[in-house]
Amino acid sequence: MSVSVLGVRHHGPGSARSLREELTRLKPDIVLIEGPPEADDLVGLAADPELLPPVALLAHVPGESSKAAFWPFAVFSPEWQAIRHAVETAVPVRFCDMPAAHSLAAAPGEDEAPAVRTDPIGALARAAGYDDPERWWEDAVEHRGDTPFQVIAEAMAEVRDGHVPDEEEARREAFMRRAIRTAVREGFERIAVVCGAWHVPALAGSREGAWGAGLPTAKADDALLRGLPKVKVETTWVPWTYGRLAAWSGYGAGVTSPGWYHHLFSAPDRPVERWLTEGAATLRAEDLPVSSAHVIEAVRLAHSLATLRGRPLAGLAEATEAVRAVLCEGDDLPVELVQRRMVVGERLGAVPESTPMVPLQRHLRQEQRRVRLKPEALDREYDLDLRKPLDLERSRLLHRLRLLDIGWGTPRESRGKGTFRESWTLTWRPEFDVELIEAGVWGTTVSTAAVARVRDLARGGQEGREVPLATLTGLVERCLLADLPDALPYVIGVLSERAALDGDVTHLMAAFPAMVRAQRYGDVRATPAEGLAAVADAMLTRICLGFGGAASGLDEDAARDLLKHVDAVHAAVALLQDAPAPEESPSGRWLGALRGVSGRSGLPGVIEGRLTRILLDAGDLDTGQVGAAMARAMSAGHPPARAAAWVEGFLSGGGLLLVHDARLLALVDDWLTGLAPETFVDVLPLLRRTFGAFAAPERRSIGSRVRSFGTRQDTAETGDAEEIDEERAAGVTRTVLALLGRTEIA
């Protein structure tokens, strides 16, 4: 009987290649691998060609999404190659680490597999005089073409000399020794144990004699493991990404350059030449000029740098410097492209249909195929035209997933105009599988789960929390976007009850815009939404009746909050269909309410100014009335701060009004120039915020008009112009008449 403990570096391509060779030489009759024993029944799926790395074992506690752990594998991971060797040679393979049932129970809230506290690679690199562990590993292992397992075991024994493992590490290694003893008792003769190199001294024991010499006894290990907390766990395979592998800190080690390691594993001969050739192809795909001569010079530079630095072969650092200096001609932007696509990589793994999944996961896979949206690790942008059936189905699926808190798609500002356009950025992350498993409690399909989730949100969850009106109206809008007619009546009913009982006008104003958009989306998407119009009309009526009281007696902060609601309601009212009689239309009722409030005393300046501007833009006030209102607001009877707030509210709709109306601009100018110096300093922040929000052309035009005050052009616009030069105007008059097809002025 022999026990061979093979220490590897997690996700090390050199270790992976050497491990395959060593397993072929040893011909073990059982292989034990560091990992959760609950996944033993899943190992057989590695023989399925549809299980494509990178993938990860997922262990989770049902109903508790925070208690989950991943064990990721890439094609260059030694553990994956050990699994592949075992299934190809029909050798039993088991995982021998601490069961996830214990590790997840002992560490609630952890979402990563246990991590080694000490970095043995870093310790060996420092001992060799390297400040970069990755570089040392490349020089000492990857560039050798083999991994001397005995030498690594001796090195780890030196690194661990005097080390006292903490409680978690001691228990993990006790479980590994227990798994080896079990295999020995079952009669296996040639046992291969694949684990992180750090654990070799704790598993191999003395170099002389039978296995177990110098190791803790089985009784001591059993005592250490007795009474551990335990929970029920489920395991499965899930797709993984190289981007997540680069960011991962669990499972012993992260990998900063998984794409490079994949390349080293798949192209052991002439890796630098092949890498730089692929880099040139990546840059050419982005229409960047890279020739074969560039590649040749880059290869020469990479090898020269390795020679100067005393390295056996050029590594990633030299290849990257060659890419920057030669292929990218010193430009860092295309270097970042190579870094993202090649060094890290954008590979997403896949799992076969036979993988254990909850029904919701399986249904989503079917939906992804139906609407032709493939999960991908890289950001993929989609511009959807909702008039097309396929794009409409895609939109509905993405909105339903967002209701389940699965953010596969992120909405972004549409490139096209109109309500028939939607733009999305899709990025698949491995964590979504955990979220899908948790969302499986709501239903077995995406649509039924979304309906159940919406109902739960509307009633405030199991605790029955009071849901704000704005949240409810937003939920109505999301139901329409997701096409959930089974959930919509329920949410509308809850919303109608809440709106009837809520006496806070600001709550109604916050909720009203989403309700109007929901009604609008129902029209655009041909989605039945009975009852929306009635609820929206009732909300607007209550807003109009209560607005006066809500706008009075406010401090500055409250006034600015209310101003946001006023603008939002005003924009929403414009989307509603007007009634035959203007005064009965939504816009007529809203403007009537504003008209009744705008003349009241005690209004905050920013509110009064904004109402005046809205009424002016709607044609309810003329420029003469607005000029009089502005003159009153800026009179000496009002504090300068209030006058500045009035100007801010009035001009928040844009500065073109001052460009085209010299009288209003002159009023603002006279008020500003009449302020005392210390007062001007006090109101300057408000004015800067107001005018700073204008577009640059508007600010330039206003400045030009102010500079022209006192010139003949300005006096002509304010009514004191000199008489028109009839002779100079005659030519222009004849040309205009000819364009109009007339011979004289009517």
Image: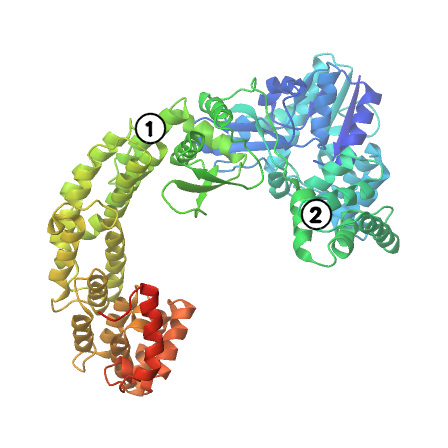
Vertical position of residue 403 compared to residue 717: above or below:
above
For the point 84% across and 27% down, which residue is it?
208
In which image quadrant can residue 570 be found?
bottom left
Left or right for 429, reference 31: left
Vertical position of residue 713 compared to residue 99: above or below:
below
User: Which numbered circle lies on residue 283?
Assistant: 2
Disc 2 residue type (three-letter): Leu
Between 416 and 495, the residue placed more toward the observer is 416
| Quadrant for the C terminus in the image | bottom left
Q: From mark 1 to mark 2, how far is it between C-alphas?
A: 46 Å
Q: Which residue is mark 1?
A: 451
User: Which numbered circle lies on residue 386?
Assistant: none
Left or right for 424, reference 91: left
Q: Nearer the viewer, mark 1 or mark 2?
A: 2
Secondary structure beneath dot 2 equals helix
For label 1, the crowd category at 10 Å Cα-Cα, with few meaning under 14, some 14 to 19 and many 20 or more, is: many
Q: Position of residue 466 (x, y in %)?
A: 24, 40
Disc 1 residue type (three-letter): Val
Q: Are marks 1 and 2 in contact (CB under 8 Å)?
A: no
